[in-house]
Image (tube, rainbow, N blue to C red):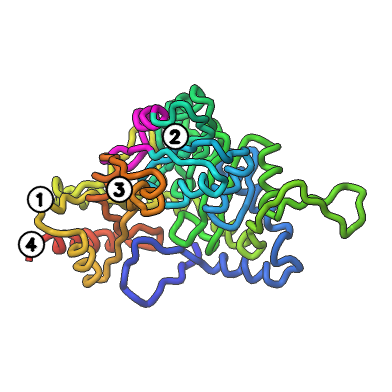
């Protein structure tokens, strides 16, 4: 096994890429080839990724946000449409609807898991009565999988497609008698992924969309490169643009890194699961004031985040106090996420809203370090530091 390049600092951030010698070699080889972008490594990475998630088609792009935008464009979502997204997510999930002129109806989430439930979707669909709901955007938060069959059933009944925000969930699966990989397209029109450095595999920046629809895949490939096509039989310099697209290409350099990283997915997934399991065991001593985020029975997660729920009020502490005490011990943490419906832009557009599940999740959540290069002893160190940080001054 290649040895990861570990930083000299003993600081443990909440997330970190794992780059090894073979990853560096893959990028070096790409640097010496003819193509730095729009070359053969793009298609090679797409094929390998599609195989990894058992999808017929995969489209590489610049980042996870571009993936969401391309999915909206490819599916024809636009002015007059409504998209439903959970409020507990990163900004991009909702913003992708606004990029194409659609409106957003925010759904609440389970305060214990942060996931949108079928009942939350049903309530949001009720708020959209009288308008065309074009897409439902469930988020597999932390790597845990939403109840996709139930959500897909509700979406279909409403005449909407499902686009999975799977940026946290590469390698995760829904257990439905058999294990169905996230991104396979069994219950959705498309699924989007991110390769940001803190994600399960990294390309620096990068994204992917998977789909079972060959025509949709082809349209998204056009749209990621300005909407250009080169008709067969035309002059070698000739191109045409039937509709404007974007420069959302993923360079060969980054695809080389992505394909190298993808080969490590089983190892990375196993390590993340083992670390998360150790956290659960070690955190038991801090219950009930601290509990891990709930994981549904149908979810076979590759954990992206180690989110815990802390009863700050009962402890007589603020979250900022705990974060600063952890940092003083060399432990990084993060909050995932501020409810999107509370952001100034959306408050101005839709008014003040109450989504009690999302608000309760936000009030208690804190993400602790989790990445494959961590040792078991690092988990013990984090939990020990957290126990100390929760003591009243």
Looking at marks 2 and 4 on the same chain, the residue that comes earlier in the sequence is marked by 2
Q: Which residue position is annotated with label 2?
A: 174
Looking at marks 3 and 4 on the same chain, the residue that comes earlier in the sequence is marked by 3
Q: Which residue position is annotated with label 3?
A: 277
Instruction: Check residue 112 for magenta coloring.
Output: yes
Residues at discs 3 and 2 in contact (Cβ within 8 Å): no
Residues at discs 3 and 4 in contact (Cβ within 8 Å): no
Between 294 and 320, the residue placed more toward the observer is 320
Looking at marks 1 and 2 on the same chain, the residue that comes earlier in the sequence is marked by 2
Q: Give the number of marks.
A: 4
Q: Which of the two discs, 3 and 2, sits closer to the camera?
A: 2
Q: Position of residue 72 (x, y in %)?
A: 58, 43
Mark 2 lies on a secondary structure that is: strand
Q: Which residue position is annotated with label 4?
A: 392
Q: Which residue position is annotated with label 1?
A: 314
Q: Is residue 44 left or right of residue 325?
A: right
Crowd tier of the residue under label 3, counting other residues whose Cα lies within 10 Å: few below 14, some 14–19, many 20 or above: few
Looking at the image, which residue is at 72% across and 47% down?
Answer: 243
């Amino acid at each position: 096994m290649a040895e990861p390049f570990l930083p000299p600092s003993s600081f443990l951030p909440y997330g970190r890429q794992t780059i090894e010698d073979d990853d560096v070699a893959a990028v070096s080889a790409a640097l010496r080839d003819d193509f730095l972008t729009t070359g053969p490594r793009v298609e090679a990475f797409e094929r390998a990724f599609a195989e990894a998630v058992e999808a017929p088609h995969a489209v590489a792009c610049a980042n996870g946000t571009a993936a969401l935008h391309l999915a909206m464009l490819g599916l024809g979502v636009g002015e007059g449409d409504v998209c439903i997204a959970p409020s507990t997510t990163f900004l991009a999930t909702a913003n992708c609807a606004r990029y194409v002129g659609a409106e957003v109806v925010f759904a609440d989430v389970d305060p214990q898991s942060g996931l949108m439930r079928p009942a939350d979707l049903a309530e949001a669909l009720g708020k959209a009565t009288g308008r065309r709901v074009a897409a439902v955007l469930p988020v597999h938060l932390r790597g845990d999988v939403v109840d996709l069959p139930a959500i897909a059933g509700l979406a279909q009944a409403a005449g909407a497609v499902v686009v999975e925000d799977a940026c946290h969930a590469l390698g995760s699966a829904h257990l439905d008698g058999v294990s169905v990989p996230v991104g396979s397209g069994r219950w959705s029109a498309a699924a989007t992924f991110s390769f940001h450095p803190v994600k399960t595999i990294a390309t620096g920046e990068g994204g992917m969309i998977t789909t079972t629809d060959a025509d949709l895949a082809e349209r998204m490939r056009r749209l990621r490169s300005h909407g250009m096509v080169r008709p067969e039989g035309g002059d070698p310099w000739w191109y045409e643009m039937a509709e404007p697209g974007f420069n959302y290409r993923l360079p060969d350099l980054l695809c080389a890194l992505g394909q190298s990283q993808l080969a490590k997915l089983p190892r990375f997934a196993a390590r993340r699961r083992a670390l998360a399991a150790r956290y659960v065991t070690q955190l038991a001593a801090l219950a009930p004031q601290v509990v891990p985020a709930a994981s549904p029975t149908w979810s076979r997660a590759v954990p992206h985040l180690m989110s815990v729920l802390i009863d700050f009020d009962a402890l007589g502490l603020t979250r900022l106090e705990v974060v600063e005490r952890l940092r003083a011990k060399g432990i990084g943490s993060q909050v995932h996420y501020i409810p999107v419906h509370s952001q100034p832009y959306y408050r101005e557009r839709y008014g003040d809203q109450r989504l009690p599940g999302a608000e309760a999740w936000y009030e208690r959540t804190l993400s602790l370090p989790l990445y494959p290069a961590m040792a078991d002893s690092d988990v013990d160190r984090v939990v020990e530091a957290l126990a100390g940080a929760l003591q009243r001054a």
